[in-house]
Image (tube, rainbow, N blue to C red):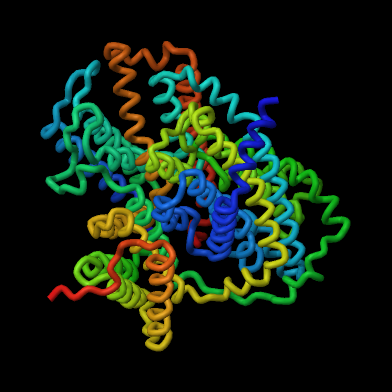
Amino acid sequence: MDIFSNIAIGLETALSWNNLFYCFLGVFLGTLVGVIPGIGVLSAISMLFPITFYLDPTTALIMLAGIWYGTSYGGNTASILLNIPGTPANAVTCLDGYPMARQGRGGVALLMTTVASFTGSTIGILLLMLFAPTIAKYALSFGSAEYFALMVLGLVAASTISDGSAVKGLAMVVLGIMFGTVGADIYTGTPRFSFGVLELTDAISLIALAMGIFGVAEVIASVRNVHPGDIDRESVTFRAMKPTKDDMRRSWFPMLRGSSIGAFFGTLPGTGPSVAAFMAYAMEKRVAREPKRFGKGAIEGIMAPESANNSADQTSFIPTLSLGIPGSPTMALMLGALMIHGIAPGPSLMTDQPSLFWGLIMSFWIGNVLLVILNVPLIGVWVRLLMIPYHLLFPAVLMFICIGTYSVNNSSFEVWLVVFFGFLGYSMRIFDFPAAPLLLGFVLGPMMEEHFRRAMLLSRGNFSTFIDRPISAVVMALTAMLLVWGVWSALKQRKRSRANLAPDPAGAS
Amino acid sequence: MLSRDYRDIVGGGLLIVGGLLFTWYAATHYELGTLRRMGPGMFPTGLGVTLALFGVLMAVPAFFRQGEMPVIRIWTPLFVLAGVAAFAMTIRPFGLIPAILAVVVISSFAELKVRPVSLAILCIVLCLIAWLTFRVGLGLPIAMWRWPF
C-alpha cells in the first residue's frame, strides 16, 4: 500500500531529533499561549515567525503547527478555572466548564477536556490523511478560473459564517486585498501605492501587518482588562481529576459528534475551530434529553466543543496543504512560511515534497501525545502561570513583537508599519470590524488578482468563464448561496433583536 | 444608548471615503487597460468601488436603528504605540538594549500606574531574555549597544 510507505517517510522525518525538539517547542509554546488570556495564537505565531527563517521548512512548519493545535489544549484551562476564554475557540467551554469548577469539579473538567481534545485531534488527523491526497489529485486539473472561484468562496465564507456582521466582514476582506495590492504589479512591474517609499515597492510585510493588527491591538484591548483571578488550587490535584462512571458514560457521544462537526467546519474555508466549537455546543444542547443541565456544569457541554475545536485544527490543513488555499489567517501565515522558503503551496506539494507533507502529519501525532503529557501531569504549572499579572506580561509581548518584526529584514521601517497597523487594528475594534478577514484578504489578494487576470486573459475578457467551467460554476453557486444565507440570517437577527428591544427598551447592558 | 447607530454610520462613512480615495488614486496614477488585458490600475479601482459600496450598505441601515457608544481608550493605545515607535527610533542608532528599555518603559505607562521596582526588575529580566534568545540562542546579527556620537 502506498499510504504505508508515506507514513514511513513521514515518521522518518518527524522522529529526527531536531524535528522532535521543535515539535515539542511548538506545542509547549502553544499551551503557554493558550493558557494565558490576552495573547492569541496569531500573535504567538507571528512573534515566532522570524525564527522560522533559520530553520528547515519542514521543521518550521512542524513548530508553527504545534503552536496552532497546542493553543486549543491550553485554552480550556483559563476557560474552566477563570471563566475567561484562553483563546476564542475555547469561549464556549466557559459555559459549562466554569460551573464545573465552581462545583469543585475543575480537575475532572481539565482532565476530560484533554481527553476530548486528543480524541478530536485523532479523528481530525485520520481524515486529513485520507482526504488531502485525494483532493490534491483532483486539484491538479484546476485552472485559474477554479482557483479564483475557490478563493472567493473562502473569503465570503470567512466573513459571513463567523460571528458579527457579514457586511463588515466582507468590507474587511476588501480592505485586506487593498493592502495586498501595495507593491510591484505582477504583470507589469509598476510599483503601486508605494508613494515613493522604497520599502513599500516590495509589498507590505505580512509579519508587520499581523503583529500590528493582532498582537499590538490585542495588547491595547487587554491592558487593565485582564486580571489574574482566584483559583481553587485543590481542584487541580491528581485526586480531584478522577472522573466518575457517569462522566465517562456521558462523554462518549458528545466527543464523537463534536469531532465530526469540528472536522467538517475545519475543512470549510473561513470557518475553523471557533465556529466548530460553537456549533458543537449548540448541537449537544439540541440533542440532549435534559437541555436544562447545560450552563450548570454539564460535562457534555465541555466535551463536544473541546473535541470539535481540536478536530477542526487538524482538518483545516486539508485545504491549506492540498489546494494551497488557507482557510484561516493562521493557515495563511503557515503558507507564508513555506513561500519564504521558496516552496510553492498547491496540489503538487504532496508529490514534490512528500517528506514535508507526511512528516508534518506524523508530527501531529507526536505533538498530540506530547500535549497530553504536558496537560495532565503538568497542569499545576500552567495554573500557576495564570496568576502572572498582565502588567508584567504585556511589555514582554511588545518587546517580542518589536524584535521579531525588526529582525526579519533588520528594518526599522517595518516596526513603523507595526505602529500603523496597531493603530488600525485598535480603530477596527472600536468600529467592531473583524480583523481575521482582513488578514485573509491580504494573503489571498495577490493570488486572487493574478488568477483573475489570467482567467480573463484566457477567456478574452469574458466574465462567463467563471460559470462556464463546471467546477468553477459549482463553487460560484455555493458562494452565492452563502451570500444569500448571510443576508437572510442578518435580517432574521435584526428582527429578533428588535423583538427583544421592544418590550424592554431600557434593557441594554 | 444613542438614538442612531453612530458607530456604524461613522465606520461606513470611513469605508466610503477610503474606498473612493483608493479608486481615485488608482485610476489617475495607473493604467487601467482592458478587461482582456488588464493594466495595474484595473483591479485596485474595482476594489475601491467595492469597499465604498460596502460602506453604503453598512451606513444606511444604521440610520434606522439605535446604537451603543463604543468605549474608546486614548491613553492606553497612545502609550503602547509610542513604545513601539520608540523602539523603531532607537534600534538603529543605539542598538537593542536601549530599544528594549524604551519599549518596555514607555508601554508600561499604559497601565496608568507606575510601579518603579517591578518595572526595573522587568527591564533587567527582559534584556537578559532578549540577549539569551536572540544573540546567544539564535545568533541574530543585531548590535546590543551602539554609540552614534
**Residue B34 seen in this snapshot:** yes
Horizontal side, residue A254 vs residue B88: left or right: right
The outermost residue toward the bottom is B117
Q: Quadrant of residue A355?
A: top right
Q: Quadrant of the N terminus of chain A?
A: top right
Horizontal side, residue A72 vs residue B86: left or right: right
Q: Quadrant of residue B94?
A: bottom left
- Which residue appears at 77% of the width and 63% of the height? A108
Where does the image place residue A86, in percent across and percent down from the top left?
56, 61
Where does the image place residue B140, in percent across and percent down from the top left?
35, 61
Compared with A250, A487 (above or below) is above
**Residue A156 seen in this snapshot:** no
The outermost residue toward the right is A245
Closer to the camera, A211 or B21? A211
Closer to the camera, A474 or A381? A381
Numbered-mark total: 0
Horizontal side, residue A306 vs residue B5: left or right: right
Closer to the camera, A421 or A56? A56
Compared with A442, A375 (above or below) is below
- Which residue appears at 59% of the width and 43% of the height? A13
Where does the image place residue B43, in percent across and percent down from the top left?
25, 29
Q: Quadrant of residue B30?
A: top left
Compared with A71, A377 (above or below) is below
Where does the image place residue A173, in percent across and percent down from the top left?
37, 39
Compared with A432, A235 (above or below) is below
- Which residue appears at 59% of the width and 49% of the height? A16
